[in-house]
Image (spheres, coloured by chain):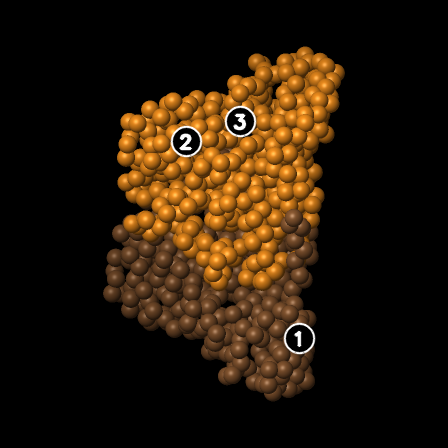
Chain colours: A brown, B orange
Amino acid sequence: MIRSFNPPVRTLMGPGPADVHPRVLAALARPTIGHLDPAFVTMMDELKDLLRLAFRTENALTMPVSAPGSAGMEICFVNLVEPGDEVVVCINGVFGARMKENIERTGGIPIVVQGQWGRAVDPNQVEETLKAHPNARLLAFVQAETSTGASSDAQTLAEIAHRHDCLTIVDAVTALGGSPLEVDAWGLDAVYSGSQKCLSCTPGLAPVTFGERALEKVRQRKTKVQSWFLDLNLVMGYWSGEQKRTYHHTAPVNALYALHESLVMLAEEGVEQAWERHAHHHRALRAGLEALGLELIVPVDERLPQLNSVAVPGGIDEALVRSRLLQHYNLELGAGLGDLAGKIWRIGLMGYSSRPTNILLCVGALANELSALGHRTDAGAALEAVRTVLDQKTPAP
Amino acid sequence: MIRSFNPPVRTLMGPGPADVHPRVLAALARPTIGHLDPAFVTMMDELKDLLRLAFRTENALTMPVSAPGSAGMEICFVNLVEPGDEVVVCINGVFGARMKENIERTGGIPIVVQGQWGRAVDPNQVEETLKAHPNARLLAFVQAETSTGASSDAQTLAEIAHRHDCLTIVDAVTALGGSPLEVDAWGLDAVYSGSQKCLSCTPGLAPVTFGERALEKVRQRKTKVQSWFLDLNLVMGYWSGEQKRTYHHTAPVNALYALHESLVMLAEEGVEQAWERHAHHHRALRAGLEALGLELIVPVDERLPQLNSVAVPGGIDEALVRSRLLQHYNLELGAGLGDLAGKIWRIGLMGYSSRPTNILLCVGALANELSALGHRTDAGAALEAVRTVLDQKTPAP
């Protein structure tokens, strides 16, 4: 007989899910109501307002997709790409490659800007590619590469795209709530994210926002959207505030309570304050890691504060370290993916995980385990380096 | 400033979501762990075993899709249908029509067996259609039509399909855990369901099961599956127990805790006992409704016990009644959809909602509100009719 599952209590410092705040878990467990209940509809309207605040946009079509971030990616491509469309796609990690898969599966023609793993997308390379492919009308790129911790300059890339009469599809899964993202000020057209990163909600939802130019492109389609579940025309019938709600699918009611609560917390803190907190804690973690002799693989001005890719020292079995951290301290770090598998750890400081306690635990635990495996470190110096940075309270922006 | 959302406490007797048991809500709020955590992987294996028990199958590919029931439908069609394929689809309500949409969007050619709303699918009509379309290799139908409360004979339909060398895609969203469903004994090939009906879990997950014949068809595809998110080959890399888990998407960790708990509860009760409970409580509700002078629209031997479609008496504004029930008693009933909009109420007795307290509340509240609107009823007789049936304890099967 299988019994109730009681998970171990972990500290989540991988690439997501991040630690979920107790307020969010409590919201998750509130009584389920119907997805057409008037009280639920009010909550949905608030949720859209809160997401607009997080995305820094006035876009009417701003809502959570009832599925994980990968479905957020897919809703952008299946609605904006039609068979035969050329789409320029930047690949500098796992998620750019997944975008290419999405383009192919919608019948589009991907034109790849091949970048380096662990580096930002190169705007000059993008400009050259757009010049060489004047028929392309879409540029797709990852702002915050979750597989490497590299941050690309979304503002510049969007500006280049628009100069070449292209719309942008932007992966902001790891960015939202953790580092600057300005959907309206930067003119991003279709942006998707995930609930389980810097929003510190449970995994399973994909916030998205579509600007007017993107919607116009959807309206001009000659073919039906290939996915019924992800057809924006139908999804909006349920999420739109302007008309009577039309049943589309049964919304994940409790998951939406949780997202609502996590966004209320973001609004209470302030979006810019949350960005600054992530940056501040990144500096503290980095000081500690460097004092341990560890190196971040992404160049300093291309780093995401919320996701730190650390080179595994020579002679160290990275999986063994992660396994010991989990066993001894209930601490989860992330492994490398793709080209970086076995070579890096990914240390997340996302949302509720971005706090002094976690930084101290991570640096202290790494110091202990590396020492135990024969890699000499100075734990005292590392912890003090963390403390020194934490004491440098940066003024709020 | 938007504040935390505190939902009203409802009794959910619509077509789903059903009342969620406190044990399931408690499971939902347990601490989030990583989707690749060894403890989580153990839980996933248990979840697959529990789903096999509920579906009555040995199918290796049995798992929850990380999205609502509509995505469960879509995973069946995008994997099993290729452009140009003829698919026979039975339409006797909203969800058969949605299946047709899915077939069209995957490039398949739907051949419709048009049935009546509120009636079972007619096996003779299916047989004639299959004879007339010898190239069709798939038969799609809804076992439990959530929009009408009609139950179709899945065993007979599957037997006819196989005789014509067709596989079956079966919608069991409302059936699973509530009324007989025998995936292996009836030879059903691809079956999808939802978490929020008779399993009494929160909405957002779609349990599916695929038999060996269906998998062979997926393996023989000439084209890539059009959805990356729903490509079975990729999804299985994460859910399969036979190989190393490959990251596909971030699983909705807490939602899966909840589904696990709801299935543990089903296993504790026993699947057949749960079916019998739903049947018993259906008889009690029906006695009460009939004593109020209300009629069920589905013929007696085609009725689902867990979803009761009741004709709205002449002169009664059905939406007003539902609104008053919600306002006065926090009781949610469902409206009609499509052809039946405005004509019926849908009263669900699903999962944890299928209990004596709910039946009594529903019959008593309907009696009061109908009386208040000038439709004379005998509440005392109706409640006694309920009690009489509840006292007739049927022996366990």
**Left or right of B247 in this view: B16:** right
Determine the residue positioned at 50% across, 45% down.
Answer: B58
Could you say which is closer to the camera, residue B308 or residue A34? B308
Tag 2 subunit: B
Nearest-to-viewer mark from 3 and 2: 2
Disc number placed over residue B159 in the picture, else none: 2
Q: Quadrant of residue B347?
A: top right
Q: Which residue is mark 3?
A: B149
Identified by mark 1, the residue type is Leu
Q: Quadrant of residue B376?
A: top right
The residue at 67%/19% (across/down) is B288
Contact (Cβ within 8 Å) of mark 1 with mark 2: no
Q: Amino acid at mark 2?
A: Glu
Mark 3 or mark 2, earlier in chain: 3
Evaluate if marks 3 and 2 touch, with contact meaning CB atoms under 8 Å apart.
no
Q: Which type of secondary structure does the marked residue at label 2 adopt?
A: helix
Q: Is residue B369 visible?
A: no
**Residue assigned mark 1:** A360
Residue A375 seen by the camera: yes
- Residue A340 appears at what percent x and percent y? 45, 73
The answer to whether residue A328 is above or below residue B159 is below
Numbered disc in front, either 1 or 2: 2
Provide the chain ID for the residue under circle 1.
A
Query: Is B77 on the left-hand or right-hand side of B303?
Result: left
Q: Position of residue B32 (x, y in %)?
A: 63, 58
A224 and B237: which one is in front? Answer: B237
User: CA separation, marks 1 and 2?
Assistant: 63 Å
- Tag 1 secondary structure: helix
